[in-house]
Image (tube, rainbow, N blue to C red):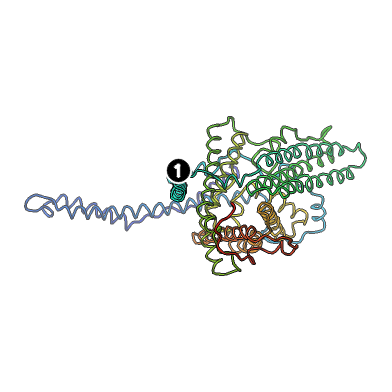
Amino acid sequence: MESGGDTVLRSRYRTIPKIPIFRDLNSSLDGECNEGEHQQGNGDNHITSNGKIEVEHVISKKLQLKRKAEFLKSDLMRQFDSQVNDFMDSLIEESASLEPAPVPAVFSPPLSDKERSKLRHFRPPHGQGKHFVSRRSLLDELFEVNHIRTIYHMFIALLILFILSTLVVDFIDEGRLVLDFDLLVYAFGQFPLVVCTWICMFLSVLLVPFTLFHLWSQTQSGSYGHPRLCTLLFGSVFLLYQAVGLGFLPTYVVVTNSLPPASCFIIILEQVRLMMKTHSFVRENVPRVLTWAKDKTSPSPVVPQVSQYLYFLFAPTLIYRDKYPRNPVIRWGYVATKLLQVLGSLFYAYYVFVRLCIPQFRSISLQLFDLRAMVLCVFNSILPGVLVLFLAFFAFLHCWLNAFAEMLRFADRMFYKDWWNSTSFANYYRTWNVVVHDWLYYYVYRDFLWMSQKRFRAAAMLFVFTVSAVVHEYILAICFGFFYPVLFCLFMCFGMMFNFILHDQRKGPIWNIIMWTSLFLGQGVIICLYSQEWYAQRYCPLKEPSFFELLKPRSWSCQRGLMADTDGL
C-alpha cells in the first residue's frame, strides 16, 4: 500500500509533459550532416583544380550547424527549467495543502461567540514561534562566487580612492600628509562615559527582569493566595523598570552630557535592544508558567537558568529560547576577519562623510527654504546616502552579528535575506533586517491580532509601522539633538503607501528597478534634510526657544552666508 506522500509524488510526475521534439530542427540538422557527408564523398564538387578545399564553404556550414545547435540547446534548457519549476511549485502547493489553511491576507470572517470565547482564553504556546536552524549568512555563501567577490573588491578599490583623494588634497592644502581623524574622534567623544552607562544598563537588565520573573513564578503555585494580584504587582514593577530604568535614565545621561552622535547611537541602540530582549524573555516564559499553574504537571514550573538568560542577552537574536542550535567550534580567524571588516566599514563611512557630505553642507549658503536648492541637495546626497546604507548593512547586519554569533557558536546566521532582489517593499521590509522583523512580527503583529481576536489585520500592520517609525525617529531625535520627523514621515506616508502599491504580487525586473529607485531617492532625502538641519542648528542657535520653536525645523528659517571658518561640525 502506497503512502500519501508517494502518491502525491507519483501524481506530480505523471503531470509533467514530455519535452517536445523539434522534428523540423532535427531533420534540418541531420540533413546538413548528411549533406556534408555526401559532399565530402563527392569531393570533386568542392575541390578546386589545385586540390585545395573551399575553406569558406566549410566554415559557413560549421557556423550554421553551431547556430542551430545553440538554438536547440537554449530552447531545450528553457523547456526543462520551466517544467522543473512547475513541478516544484506543484510540490510546494501539495505540501501546503497538508498543513492548516493559511489565514486570509485582509480581514478574517466574523467569528462566532463560541470561537471568540475560546480565543479570549487562548495563549500562544511556548515555542510555537520562530524556529532556529543551523544556516550560514547569505553573503558568506555569495562571497564564495568569484563574480560576487569581485563586487566586494570594487568597494575596497573605491575606499582606496577615497583615502588617496583625501591624502592628496591634504598634501596640496597643507604641504604635508595629514592623517588625523578628527571626525571620528569627535563622533566617539566621551567614550568612557558610554562604557560606564552601558555596564550599568546591562547589569540592571541581567538582575532586575530575571529576579522579578523568578519571584513572580513562585507566586503562581497557589500558596501565596492571590496569584492574579501578584501578577499585577510584578507586571507593574517590570513596566516601571522598563520605563524608568531602561527608558528614562540612559536618555537622561545622553541629553544632559550632550554626547556626540556616535556615542549617542551606542547608548540608545543598546537601550532599545535590551528593552526588546527583556520583553521577549518575559513574553516567552510567562505563558509557560501560566500553563504549569493551570495543569500542575510538575512540582514546580520550569524556569530558565541564569546561564540561559545571560547567553540570550549576548546572542544575535531578539527571540528568546532556552536552547539554540550551536556550532561545534569557534573559528577565531573568522571572528578577526569580521571585526576588521567592521573597522574598515567605519573608516569607509568616515571618508564618505569627509569627501562627499561635509564639503557640501558645511559651505552651503543657508537661506530660506528654496525648492531648487533642495532638489539639487537631494540628488547630490543620493551617492553618500546609498554608500552609508550599504556600509550600515554590511558592518552591522553581516559582520558584527556574525562575529558575535561565531564567538557564541550561534548557528542560525539568517540575520537578513536577499533584500536586494525584492520586487516589493513588503518583501524588502521582511528581508532587510530579519532580527528586528521577527520581533515585530511575533510580539507586535501577532499579539495585536490575538488581542483583537484576529479581526483587524490592516490595523495590526498599521500599528507595526507606527511602532517602527516612532522608535526610529526617537533614536534619530535623541542622537542628533533635534526633532525633525523626516524618517517618520517616510515610514508612515511613503512606506505604508509603497507597502500596498508594491506588494508581493508585483514580479519582474521592472519592479525591482522601481524599488531600488525609491530606496535611493529616500536615502538622498534623509541625508540632505538631516544634514541641513544639523548645520542650521549650529549656525542659528536659539537663546530662549519656546516649545513650538523646538519642534519647528531650524533649516526653514535660518539664513547665513557662506561660512569661512567652522568649529569642527
Can residue 296 be seen in the rendering of this structure? yes
Pick the front one: 193 or 507: 193
Q: Where is residue 457 in the image (x, y as percent from the top left)?
A: 71, 59
Pick the front one: 276 or 268: 268
Pick the front one: 146 or 77: 146
Query: Residue lying farthest left?
Result: 49
Q: Residues within 10 Å of mark 1 (few under 14, many from 20)?
A: few
Pick the front one: 96 or 563: 563
Residue 499, relative to residue 400: is it above or below?
A: below
Can residue 103 be seen in the rendering of this structure? no
Is residue 51 toward the left or the right of residue 484 in the image? Answer: left
Q: Which picture quadrant has residue 301?
A: top right
Q: Which picture quadrant has residue 210?
A: top right
The quarter of the rendered structure image containing the N terminus is top right
Residue 412, relative to residue 474: is it above or below?
A: above
Q: Position of residue 35 (x, y in %)?
A: 21, 54
Q: Residue at x 66, y 43 (%)?
A: 190
Query: Residue lying farthest right?
Result: 225
Task: Return the residue at label 1.
Answer: 145
Q: Position of residue 368 (x, y in %)?
A: 61, 68
Is residue 546 toward the left or the right of residue 418 in the image? Answer: right
Q: Position of residue 261 (x, y in %)?
A: 64, 49
Q: What residue type is labelled 1?
A: Val
Q: Residue at x 74, y 39 (%)?
A: 200
Query: Residue lying farthest top?
Result: 329
